[in-house]
Image (spheres, rainbow, N blue to C red):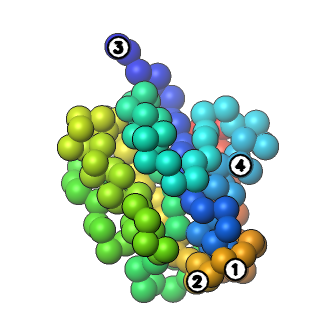
C-alpha cells in the first residue's frame, strides 16, 4: 500500500490537564485554520498507532515534563532512534507518547519519518487553560506547523 506523502500532524493530550492539553490545542487550532492533515487524539493508543501507520511523514506533538523550563520546545527524530522515556512521558501516569511510539515500532507500524515535538509544561493539575509560557511556545510552533502541513 502506498502511504500519503504529505506531512500529517497528530496532537496528543488530555482535555482536563492544563498544559497537558497543548497537543490537542495545537491540532484543533491547525484544523480551525484550514489544515486538513491533522488530528487531535486524547490518549487513545490504538488510534495513535493507526494514524502513524497510515502516513509516511508524521509530526507528533505533546506536552513534556522533563525538568526543562516551561515552554521549552524539544524535538526528537523517532524514526532514527528510540524515544527517551524521561522526556516524552505522560505526566499523570497513563501511557505517554514515548511508550506508544515504541509499541508501534515493535509492531512494525512506525512511519518512515516521525518527529516528536514536545512543549515543556508547567501545570498538569486538573483544569483548563495553558500557562503563559506554554501558550507562547504553542503559538510559535503553530506558525511553523501551518507552513509544513497547511
Residue sitting at the far right? 32
In three-dimensional space, the C-alpha distance between marks 4 and 3, rounded to whole angstroms, equals 29 Å
Query: Mark 2 or mark 1: which comes first in sequence?
Result: 2
Q: How many marks?
A: 4
Numbered disc 2: secondary structure: loop
Q: Residue at x 43, y 41 (%)?
A: 46
- Please say if 57 is above or below 68: above
Closer to the camera in the image, 46 or 39 = 46
**To which residue does mark 4 refer?**
28
Q: With 25 as the anchor, is 56 left or right in this view?
A: left
- Please say if 10 is above or below 142: above
Residue 124 is drawn in which quadrant? bottom right
Residue 8 image position (x, y, % from top left) = 52, 37
Residue 50 image position (x, y, % from top left) = 43, 34
Q: Residues within 10 Å of mark 2 (few under 14, many from 20)?
A: many
Residue 102 image position (x, y, % from top left) = 27, 52
Query: Mark 1 or mark 4: which comes first in sequence?
Result: 4
**To which residue does mark 1 refer?**
131
Mark linked to residue 122 = 2
Q: Residues within 10 Å of mark 4 (few under 14, many from 20)?
A: some
Query: Mark 4 or mark 3: which comes first in sequence?
Result: 3
Numbered disc 1: secondary structure: loop
Numbered disc 3: secondary structure: loop
Q: Residue at x 66, y 45 (%)?
A: 146
**To which residue does mark 3 refer?**
1
Look at the image and tell me whether residue 144 can be seen.
no
In three-dimensional space, the C-alpha distance between marks 2 and 1, rounded to whole angstroms, equals 7 Å
Q: Does the residue at mark 4 contact the one at mark 3 (Cβ under 8 Å)?
A: no
Amino acid at each position: 500500500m502506498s502511504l500519503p506523502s504529505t506531512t500529517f500532524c497528530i496532537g496528543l493530550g488530555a482535555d482536563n490537564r492544563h498544559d497537558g492539553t497543548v497537543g490537542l490545542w495545537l491540532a484543533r487550532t491547525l484544523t480551525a485554520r484550514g489544515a486538513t492533515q491533522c488530528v487531535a487524539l486524547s490518549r487513545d493508543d490504538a488510534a495513535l498507532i493507526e494514524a502513524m501507520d497510515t502516513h509516511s511523514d508524521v509530526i507528533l506533538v505533546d506536552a513534556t515534563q522533563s525538568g526543562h523550563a516551561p515552554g521549552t520546545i524539544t524535538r526528537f527524530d523517532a524514526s532514527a532512534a528510540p524515544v527517551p522515556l524521561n522526556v516524552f512521558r505522560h505526566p499523570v501516569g497513563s501511557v505517554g507518547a514515548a511508550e506508544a511510539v515504541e509499541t508501534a515500532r515493535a509492531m512494525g507500524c512506525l512511519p518512515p519519518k516521525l518527529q516528536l515535538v514536545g512543549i515543556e509544561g508547567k501545570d498538569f493539575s486538573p483544569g483548563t487553560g495553558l500557562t503563559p509560557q506554554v501558550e507562547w511556545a504553542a503559538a510559535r510552533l503553530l506558525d511553523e506547523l501551518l507552513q509544513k502541513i497547511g
